[in-house]
């Protein structure tokens, strides 16, 4: 299931416009904060699908029956996913966290492969997993990340959160992990030969943290 959060009018549509706009992208703090906000909106929407426990709370005036959501495991792919991940963590503030360091290793012919160099994760057994990746382009890095995570243990539910998703990446995830739910700020149709989304927004990691020099 794919949830395109910009299909309905909300302030999220403004934040998606700003992260796309070359006139605004030069403000790194604003770019990171808008990514964070998109993560917060996604967290709120995902929270509506979760199970809740009923608790009795003592107030100064008596007792109240309240509901509390189960806490998920939040995961992201370093470095680009950090602001989006922070938005999720702002709402699921007691969540456990998983981190994967992955990047595109480009070749002279324009092709690339995904390299993973670091992985840390709590126990995922029968827990909700929410993984943040700001640009769901080819889907290759997310598929590799999910394969790594689910080889450790099997979560009860998997949610993917992205700022911009491409139909090609969505279709790959549907084939490899048909049970996942995808939450995205917008869906674009085209990829370049180098695997970048069009119109997309460019390189989310560079826009958030600066240009990288990578061998």
Image (cartoon, grey):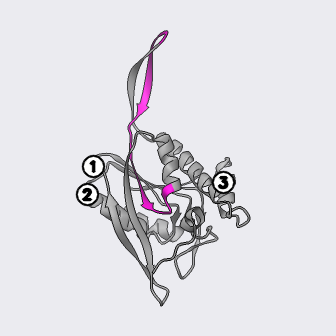
- Residue 70 on the magenta segment: yes
Q: Is residue 10 left or right of residue 170?
A: right
Within 10 angstroms of label 1, few (less than 14), some, or many (20 or more) residues? some
- Residue 205 shows up from this direction: yes
Sequence order check, earlier mark of 2 and 3: 3
Residue at the location (42% across, 40% down)?
50
Q: Position of residue 4 (x, y in %)?
A: 57, 55
Q: Nearer the viewer, residue 3 or 93?
A: 93
Q: Is residue 50 above or below residue 180?
A: above
Sequence order check, earlier mark of 2 and 1: 1
Q: Are marks 2 and 1 in contact (CB under 8 Å)?
A: yes
| Highlighted magenta segment, given as a residue range | 60-82
Q: Position of residue 99 (x, y in %)?
A: 38, 57
Task: Identify residue for label 1.
Answer: 123
Within 10 angstroms of label 2, few (less than 14), some, or many (20 or more) residues? some
CA distance separating discs 2 and 1: 8 Å
CA distance separating discs 2 and 3: 35 Å
Q: Secondary structure at mark 3?
A: helix
Dominant secondary structure of the magenta stretch? Answer: strand
CA distance separating discs 3 and 1: 34 Å
Task: Identify residue for label 3.
Answer: 15
Task: Identify residue for label 2.
Answer: 152
């Amino acid at each position: 299931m794919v949830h395109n959060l910009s299909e309905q009018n909300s302030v999220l549509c403004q934040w998606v416009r700003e992260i796309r706009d070359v006139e605004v992208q030069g403000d790194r703090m604003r770019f990171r904060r808008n990514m964070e906000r998109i993560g917060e909106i996604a967290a709120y929407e995902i929270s509506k699908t979760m199970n809740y426990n009923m608790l009795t709370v003592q107030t100064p005036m008596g007792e109240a029956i309240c509901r509390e959501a189960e806490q998920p495991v939040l995961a992201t792919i370093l470095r680009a996913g950090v602001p989006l991940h922070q938005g999720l963590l702002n709402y699921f503030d007691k969540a456990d966290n998983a981190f994967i360091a992955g990047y595109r290793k480009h070749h002279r012919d324009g092709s690339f492969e995904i390299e993973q160099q670091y992985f840390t994760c709590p126990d995922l057994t029968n827990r909700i997993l929410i993984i943040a990746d700001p640009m769901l382009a080819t889907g290759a890095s997310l598929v590799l990340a999910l394969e790594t995570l689910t080889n450790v243990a099997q979560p009860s539910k998997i949610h993917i959160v992205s700022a911009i998703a491409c139909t090609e990446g969505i279709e790959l995830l549907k084939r490899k992990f048909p049970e996942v739910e995808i939450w995205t700020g917008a869906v674009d149709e085209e990829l370049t030969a180098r695997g970048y989304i069009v119109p997309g927004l460019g390189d989310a990691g560079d826009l958030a943290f600066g240009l990288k020099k990578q061998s």
